[in-house]
Image (spheres, grey):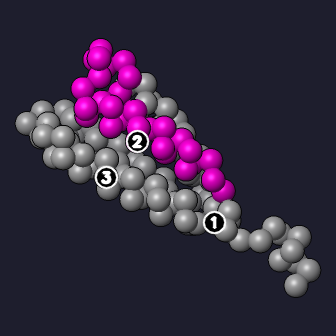
Amino acid sequence: MWGRVVEIMTAVWLAASPFVFRVQDSESFVLVDSLIALLVAILAGLSYWSPTRHAHVLILVVATGLTFWGRFAELPPPPIHQNHIVVGLFLIMIAIIPNDASRPPRQWRSSA
């Protein structure tokens, strides 16, 4: 489940990034980044609950939208949008990691 922890940490970074890149005067960046960060954290957290253990796959959709928004909102992209691109691509890489990636394969667990 380490992938879900990394997704939650990335959500915290995304929520803090408008202040790091000094665009906190733009309420839209603060609001959108905070809502996306909250959605990523909720989806990663839901993956800990057995009935919704695949909720982290929906982060792929959110991350893809974040990447496209960062790339095509303004040309050339300012630093805050470059951050959206990097965070989106990073979340895509992490979201495809299964919840039990650090555990041995099921066949090995059942034979012990």
- Range drawn in magenta: 70-98
Residue drawn at (67%, 68%) of the image? 102
The foreground one among 103 and 65 is 103
Please tell me whether the stretch drawn in magenta is mainly helix, strand or loop.
helix
Q: Which residue is mark 1?
A: 50
Residue 7 coordinates in the image, percent (x, y): 46, 55
In this view, the residue farthest toward the top is 75
Residue 84 point in image, percent of width and height: 35, 35
Do the CB atoms of the residues marked 1 and 2 lie less than 8 Å apart?
A: no
Look at the numbered discs 2 and 3 and tell me whether their residues touch, using CB distance below 8 Å: yes
Task: Look at the numbered disc 1 and give the secondary structure of its residue.
Answer: helix
How far, Cα to Cα, is label 1 from label 2? 27 Å
Q: Which residue is mark 3?
A: 13
Identify the image quadrant of residue 52. Answer: bottom right
Rendering coords of residue 22 (x, y %): 13, 40
**Residue at image x 68%, y 63%?**
101
